[in-house]
Structure formats: structure tokens, C-alpha cells
Amino acid sequence: MGKHVSSIVSAANKKLFVLRKLYDSGFNRKELIQAYVVYIRSNLEYCSVVWGPNLTQNLASKIERVEKKCLSIICRKRVDRFNYDETLIELKLEALAVRRDNALHRFGFKLFFSRYLYFLPPLINPDSSNRRKLRNRPQLLVEPSCKTDKYKNSTIPTLIRLVNNEYKDKETVFGFKIQTFMSMLETG
């Protein structure tokens, strides 16, 4: 994981030169943001569904450091942990961590409606009458038992936890009520 993040960071840092040259050539802020999104952020997010759930805080901060450098070039002010969120709001961008989480949610939704649904454990019927009514809402998917942290933090177990937590907290799955979601699965 560390080698992959190092290669991503190295490739993105090499492209900072292009962003600086665009600024020096007189490109406006909107064009610089577009260049950042297309040339640099796309590299920082490539296949993040696979490696994103397994990121440590240290590795995530290495990736964020590149984004802060880019934002510093675009805004022509130092962007650090103190003004990072305000700068993102000012430029109307989302943080990389938020984008990784959104990508994982989109992937999960597509996985449920694809031919690869068999990668997930079978759904537990939430309306089964043989279940006891407990205070805690039951899980929608059975979480796999994981022997290592690497597997526990990989894509599929993380996705299962996200679905179960949303079901427990909001009684929804990917924003849909459970009955609507189950009928969508049956039809499509």
C-alpha cells in the first residue's frame, strides 16, 4: 500500500510543474482548477475504491499534502490544515477523503445491481417473521469474519459495514427505503 501511495504522490508532484507554468502563463483560477481536476486529482483518485478503504492516516495525509500544494498554487496563498477546508469551500471542491467515500458508495450501489452481486454475502430478509424483535436493528448483510486487518479494511468488508450502518441508523440502503431497495433488486 505504501509503495502505491508513494508512486501516486510522486506522479502528482511531477505534474505540479505544469500547474505552476499555467499560472505563470496567465490562466485564471477557473482554468487552473480545471487543470488540477483533470491532470492531478484524477491520478490521486485512480482506483481509490480498491485502495481507499485500507489507507492509514499517514498515507491519507501524504495524498492530501499534494492537494494542499495544488491549492496553494491555484490560490497563491499557503494552504495548510488550518485553512484547508475553507479553501475547498471557496474553490467549490470536495476533499479527497470525501470523494473516496462517495466513490465507494457509488461502487457499492453498482455492485448490488450488477452480475457480480455474488461477491457480497446474501441479503438477510428484514421482514422475516421468525426473527425476534430486538432493540438493535439486525444487519442487512452478514459481515465476513476477518483474520487480518488488511482484509478487514479491504473494499468488500468495508462496503458491507457501510450498508449495515446505514440500515441500522437510517433504515435505508443507499438512500432508498428498504422496501424500495428490495423491490429494485428483484426487478433489476
Image (tube, rainbow, N blue to C red):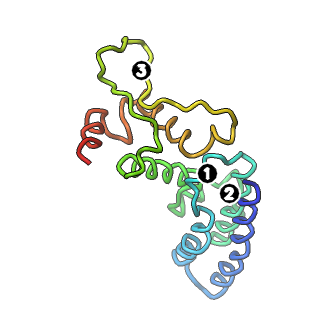
**Which numbered marker is on residue 64?**
2
Residue at the image point whose x is 36% and y is 41% from the top = 175
Residue at the image point whose x is 49% and y is 51% from the top = 102
Q: Amino acid at mark 1?
A: Gly
Q: Residue 180's x, y, as percent?
A: 26, 37
Label 1 or label 3, whichever comes before in sequence order:
1
Q: Position of 20 compared to 94: left or right?
A: right
Q: Secondary structure at mark 2?
A: helix
Marks 1 and 3 in Cβ contact (< 8 Å): no
Residue at the image point whose x is 63% and y is 83% from the top = 22
Q: Amino acid at mark 3?
A: Arg
Q: CA distance from mark 2 to mark 1?
A: 13 Å
Q: Quadrant of residue 32?
A: bottom right
Which residue is label 1 attached to? 52
Q: Quadrant of residue 40?
A: bottom right
Label 3 or label 2, whichever comes before in sequence order:
2
Q: Secondary structure at mark 1?
A: helix
Q: Residues within 10 Å of mark 3 (few under 14, many from 20)?
A: some
Q: Nearer the viewer, residue 105 or 152?
A: 152
Q: Position of 169 compared to 177: left or right?
A: right
Q: Report the residue that reaches farthest toward the bottom.
A: 25
Q: Is residue 130 above or below residue 64?
A: above
